[in-house]
Image (spheres, helix red, strand yellow):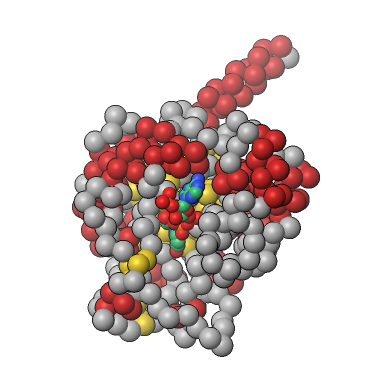
Amino acid sequence: MLFIKSLFLTASFVCVLCENKDGGKAPRLPLNDGNSIPALGLGTFLGFDEHGQKEVKDGEVELPVTLALNAGYRLFDTAQAYKNEHQVGKAVRESSVPREDVYIVTKLASNKQDKPVGSLFESLKEMNLSYVDLYLIHNPVAFTPDEKAYAIIDYKRTWKGMEVAKNNGLARSIGVSNFNISQLERLMEHSEIKPAVLQVEVNLNLAQDKLLEFCKEHDIVVMAYTPFGGLFDKTTESPPPRADDPELVKIAEKYKKSTPQVVLKYLVQRGVVPIPKSIRKEKIEENINIFDFELTPEEMTTLSKFNKDYRTVNPSFWQDHPYYPFEKTDTPAPDPFKRNKE
Ligand SMILES: NC(=O)c1ccc[n+]([C@@H]2O[C@H](COP(=O)([O-])OP(=O)(O)OC[C@H]3O[C@@H](n4cnc5c(N)ncnc54)[C@H](OP(=O)(O)O)[C@@H]3O)[C@@H](O)[C@H]2O)c1
């Protein structure tokens, strides 16, 4: 009996060590395929300006990734569409952190959905790496190679290629992004490997309760993109809260943290993996320093009340595509990607 007890204690101790064996600041969460994912990562998409998607200048993404590696990040979220994979790969290759301790996520471009394996080879070549940790279908909406028109490519077919990528070791795990519940159900009915991860928008304004519940039931980890929602919005467009909201400030002061840190911790305690983007050293460091305090159930409830089911990233300009995943509107927004193509 004593022997079994000590064996159990040793096993649990080893397991606790396993959680942080990558040397990073975030613990790891288990995935349904036996792999694990850091509980927080760095987003790398630079967004849009008046010309469309921002051009990525030399070193503009490489430097934040290097700063983040030094600050204890181990997860990096990139995509073919972000046009920065080469900089992410370079920062990771040139860092003293071993490749096996870093978790790299990339995504299949929407104009290459008919060739997920070929497209992953292109991403790996850009990054000069031999595998990614997670490969996601970026969106169920697909485009023709010249991106000028919709392509109707069934994501079930694309998924077969994602499975090939995993079976050949090019991607350790596979998943999807911007899929809704019925699309996930349809995908799982027809797949041999179920998605390990779903990446969607989750923040104080967009709680995604039903989607999170569904993913929990099916053992799919949710990654939260745009984790700050409208927190830093200088317009009145998105609903409250802003970073100076009195309720947020009160909670932050109690733990001697900033309000963005409280928001990230709230997401982590909901079991999702936030991927805040920052290019500033102090903010990169601030955003990962959230693993030394715990919000109470009452504080979690207070924060949950900010939910308005409001999407910060609302690609309604694609809503005529048959696989558009979100609610439709009478007044679709202008397509910011179009400006690059004009
Ligand atoms: N799968 C998808 O379709 C999809 C869609 C959108 C995003 N994503 C991924 O999710 C990542 C994050 O989303 P996001 O970039 O949309 O939004 P976000 O991470 O919620 O917000 C980024 C903004 O917050 C600022 N910021 C970051 N930390 C801060 C802090 N502690 N205090 C004050 N300001 C702070 C950043 O400015 P500075 O950089 O100047 O610090 C930037 O303007 C993206 O980079 C991308 O990797 C995926």
Front in this rendered view, residue 117 or 48? 48
Quarter holding the C terminus is: bottom left
Q: Residue at x 28, y 55 (%)?
A: 84
In the picture shown, does residue 327 fall above or below 195?
A: below
Q: Residue at x 21, y 47 (%)?
A: 128
**Image quarter (top left, top right, bottom left or bottom right) of the N terminus:** top right
Q: Nearer the viewer, residue 220 or 275?
A: 275
Pinpoint residue 277: horizontal percent, then vertical percent: 43, 51
Is residue 231 something that shows in the picture?
A: yes
- Residue in the image at 50% along x and 67% along y: 313
**In the depicted view, which residue is nearer to us: 304 or 161?**
304
Residue placed furthest toward the bottom: 330
Give above or below for 64 relative to 242.
Answer: above
Task: Looking at this view, name the residue that lies furthest to the top.
Answer: 2
Horizontally, residue 314 falls left or right of residue 42, namely: right
Query: Which x, y percent locates residue 251?
Result: 69, 42
Left or right, residue 28 beside residue 121: right
In this rendering, the count of numbered labels is 0
The picture places residue 255, in percent across and down from the top left corner, at: 66, 34
In depth, the one of 324 and 132 nearer the eye is 324
Vertical relation: 61 (above or below) 111:
above
| Left or right placement of residue 51 versus residue 317 in this view | left
Q: Residue at x 57, y 83 (%)?
A: 329
- The answer to whether residue 322 shows anywhere in this view is no
